[in-house]
Image (spheres, rainbow, N blue to C red):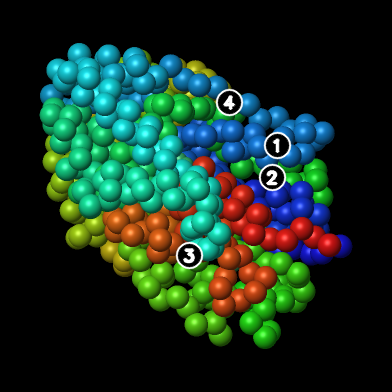
């Protein structure tokens, strides 16, 4: 039986493992941690459960598709839509409880922000059209195979390029929404792939359609169920997991990946090797004899995050599953992150509270707060000092916006920094989404899902095509599996 190795049990590694089993391979996954899921992991602390990484779940059908591939195996995985997409707060006490469907969003936003409904409706219409005309080319196919460019969808997408806003920034495009708060709300979508709205192109205005038009979901049992259910499925269909076993080297002979060395001193030969490790350390640490594609590796990295996981000894009825407390100076916040590589003293604060939907995630009368601000990657800053200062700034921001006194309510605390994200997942500089999309050609600069210099070596995950975030990582595994021949 043909043998495949997967390096890393992140969401993309798990999806690739399942797809290769489906193609007839015997699959072994090597994972440096003692758990599967990579960034999609969870902890429990003093009666609180916290999802450590992602909180927003879109395109759930991509997870369903993997479960359906092995529909004789029953692994619990279910999710629900939520009636509101997010509660947005500003310090002047403006609150927008954004509905989760496009038409309701348009109606409510028009009232709250005093903007004509038609302007917002047109925005969503264009958002949908951008998403639909580009997804099959930019998200579902390899951009690095000639066959993609002869496909009718590609020809259609290329014809659309002048209308996608590739030469305009997202912020400039959003200015059509008149009201500064509504512009800020739509600018925030740049952060969904770790970019700045003042640099990324207006093509990102397709994301509101993905979130509001196609909907966001909450997995029963929390975000961790996404990775856990795929791991359970993989075990059931025969994937072998070797935890606490890092791959140290990919052996290349005659330009062909043939074997791996691991930290347990195992040398194992494989027919196919798929790296779910970030592309930067894959080249720098595992492929030291192979000339790296420097332009790709030097691409600006996406933002990272500073996250406080707080057990809160009170319920806040004004808060929902997803909440945003906006900075008073959004351009300065992004300038601090991307240009000065530091944290702004009035950050936009995201609070995710899963106990709103899963009450057992917190003790009675309490809530589990995931409090995140966007942060630069790790460039050697003094994180101890930045964390201490930001903790004060975040608490002050929450106090001002929600008229509360938070510090005495914090029961328990866990902190994750960009350094911690890199330590836990090998993500270069702790980037959440691989390369940033601040460059308009970023989509074309991402590393392909195959290796043009090393045969039998493939790449999946957030640092390669088509990019970061759960749906794109799942699509990277799908594109990759399509490139790998069936096992003979
Ligand atoms: C705080 C945070 C919030 C986020 N929010 C969202 C969100 O709301 N929605 C969303 O869609 N996405 C979100 N993301 C992004 C999303 O989590 C990632 O894009 C996705 O999970 C990345 O998956 P991956 O498979 O590429 O890699 P990872 O999850 O990074 O997994 C890589 C795995 O490889 C292992 N590994 C690395 N090197 C080796 C080696 N040499 N040998 C063996 N194992 C190795 C690592 O230990 C890790 O388990 C967020 C991420 C973070 C951190």
Mark 3 sits on what residue? Answer: 447
Q: Image quadrant for the N terminus?
A: bottom right
Of mark 4 and mark 3, the one earlier in the sequence is 4
Mark 1 sits on what residue? Answer: 67
Of mark 2 and mark 1, the one earlier in the sequence is 1
- Left/right placement of residue 404 relative to residue 79 reads left
* On screen, residue 304 above or below 106: below
Where is residue 201 shown, x and y percent of the image?
A: 27, 49
Q: Which mark is residue 231?
A: 2
Circle 1: is it few (<14), some (14-19), or many (20+) Cα within 10 Å? many
Q: Residue at x 27, y 29 (%)?
A: 123
Q: Which mark is residue 426?
A: none
Secondary structure, mark 1, is helix
Foreground label between 2 and 1: 1
Q: CA distance from mark 4 to mark 3?
A: 32 Å
Q: Residue at x 50, y 21 (%)?
A: 81
Residue 297, image quadrant: bottom left
Q: Which mark is residue 79?
A: 4
Q: CA distance from mark 2 to mark 3?
A: 26 Å
Q: In terms of depth relative to the viewer, which is nearer, 273 or 90?
A: 273
Q: CA distance from mark 2 to mark 1?
A: 11 Å
């Amino acid at each position: 039986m043909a043998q495949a190795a997967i390096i890393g049990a992140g969401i993309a590694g798990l999806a690739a493992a399942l797809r290769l089993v489906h193609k007839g391979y015997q699959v072994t996954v090597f994972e440096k941690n003692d758990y599967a899921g990579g960034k999609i992991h969870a902890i429990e602390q003093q009666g609180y459960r916290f999802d450590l990484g992602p909180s927003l779940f879109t395109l759930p059908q991509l997870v369903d598709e993997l479960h359906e591939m092995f529909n004789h195996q029953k692994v619990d995985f279910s999710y629900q839509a939520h009636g509101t997409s997010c509660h947005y707060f500003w310090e002047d006490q403006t609150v927008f409880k954004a509905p989760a469907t496009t038409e309701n969003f348009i109606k409510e936003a028009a009232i709250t922000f005093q903007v004509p409904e038609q302007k917002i409706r047109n925005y969503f219409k264009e958002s949908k059209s951008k998403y639909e005309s580009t997804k099959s080319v930019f998200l579902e196919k390899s951009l690095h195979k000639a066959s993609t460019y002869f496909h009718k969808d590609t020809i259609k997408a290329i014809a659309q390029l002048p209308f996608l806003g590739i030469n305009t920034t997202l912020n400039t495009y959003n200015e059509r929404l008149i009201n500064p708060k509504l512009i800020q709300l739509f600018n925030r979508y740049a952060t969904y792939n770790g970019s700045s709205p003042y640099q990324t192109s207006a093509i990102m205005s397709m994301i509101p359609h993905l979130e509001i038009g196609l909907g966001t979901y909450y997995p029963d049992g929390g975000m961790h169920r996404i990775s856990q259910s795929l791991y359970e499925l993989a075990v059931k269909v025969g994937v072998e997991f070797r935890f606490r076993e890092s791959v140290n080297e990919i052996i290349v002979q005659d330009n062909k990946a043939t074997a791996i060395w691991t930290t347990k001193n195992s040398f194992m030969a494989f027919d196919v090797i798929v790296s779910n490790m970030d592309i930067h350390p894959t080249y720098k640490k595992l492929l030291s004899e192979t000339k790296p594609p420097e332009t790709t590796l030097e691409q600006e990295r996406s933002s990272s995050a500073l996250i406080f996981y707080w057990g809160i000894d009170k319920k806040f009825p004004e808060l929902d599953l997803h909440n945003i407390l906006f900075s008073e100076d959004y351009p300065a916040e992004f300038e601090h992150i991307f240009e000065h590589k530091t944290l702004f003293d009035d950050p936009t604060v995201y609070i995710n509270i899963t106990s709103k939907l899963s009450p057992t995630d917190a003790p009675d009368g309490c809530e589990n707060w995931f409090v995140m601000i966007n942060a630069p990657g790790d460039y050697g800053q003094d994180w101890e000092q930045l964390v201490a200062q930001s903790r004060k700034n975040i608490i002050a921001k929450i106090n001002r916006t929600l008229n509360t006194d938070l510090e005495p309510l914090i029961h328990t605390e866990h902190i994750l920094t960009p350094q911690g994200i890199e330590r836990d997942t090998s993500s270069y500089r702790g980037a959440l989404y691989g390369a940033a999309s601040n460059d308009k050609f970023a989509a074309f600069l991402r590393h392909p899902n195959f290796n043009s210099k090393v045969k039998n070596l493939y790449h999946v995950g957030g640092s390669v095509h088509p990019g970061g975030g759960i749906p794109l990582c799942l699509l990277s595994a799908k594109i990759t599996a399509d490139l790998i021949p069936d096992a003979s």
